[in-house]
Image (cartoon, rainbow, N blue to C red):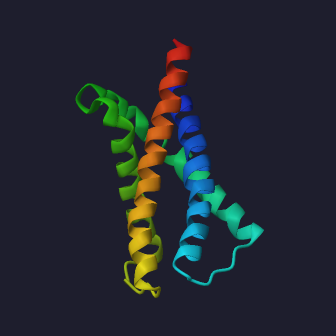
Amino acid sequence: MRRIGIALVAGGIGGLIVLGVGGRVLMRALTITTEEAARFSVEGTLQVIGAGTGWGALTGPMLLAFRQLRPQLGSATGAAFGVAVLLLAFLAVGLIAGFDGGIVAPRAFIAASAVAFPALFVLHGIVADSLAERWWDRAR
């Protein structure tokens, strides 16, 4: 039970830092570099940070399964976890918002987003795995 709690917290903190704050910073950087006009509000920023934290905590317990694969995955455990979280996010967004493909944005913005946002999920997995590893070692 303690490991599930650690996985929840590690996922949540990784989600807060990387998916939440990092995601919002990335959104801003993409709008600046691609000249895409966008408004950013405190409310919107808090929503992104909350969503990142929540998604990280919600998927954190999956980290336990990936930790079981550590002998096979080695140092790629966190990255593999991040890819799994990304795939679940695609599935969740598709089920909630629908897969209509109706994205209207400049090509440069879409291309940059297609690379940058998945990288955030991989980084989230690495951060969450590192935090969990550190805390599990201390809990022994």
- 44 left or right, relative to 123: right
Residue situated in front as seen by the camera: 101 or 134: 134
Could you tell me if residue 94 is visible in this image?
no
Percent position of residue 39, x then y: 68, 79
Q: Is residue 2 above or below residue 22?
A: above
User: Which residue lies at the image location 47% right of the left edge and 76% below the top edge?
Assistant: 97
Q: How many marks?
A: 0
Residue 56 rendering spot, x and y as whole percentages:
53, 48
Residue farthest to the top, as pictured: 140
Toward the viewer: 91 or 112? Answer: 112
Residue ranking furthest to the front: 33
Picture residue at 55% right of the left edge, 15% below the top: 139
Q: Position of residue 37 (x, y in %)?
A: 61, 84
Q: Is residue 139 above or below residue 40?
A: above
Left or right: 128 as drawn, with respect to 32: left
In this orientation, which residue lies closer to the viewer: 24 or 5? 24
Instruction: Residue at 39%, 38% (x, y): give it.
Output: 78
Displayed quadrant of residue 27: bottom right
Q: Would you say residue 118 is visible in this rendering? A: yes
Percent coordinates x, y for residue 34 in the rendering: 51, 79
Q: Is residue 59 above or below residue 22?
A: above
Q: Residue furthest left?
A: 72
| Picture residue at 56% right of the left edge, 50% below the top | 18
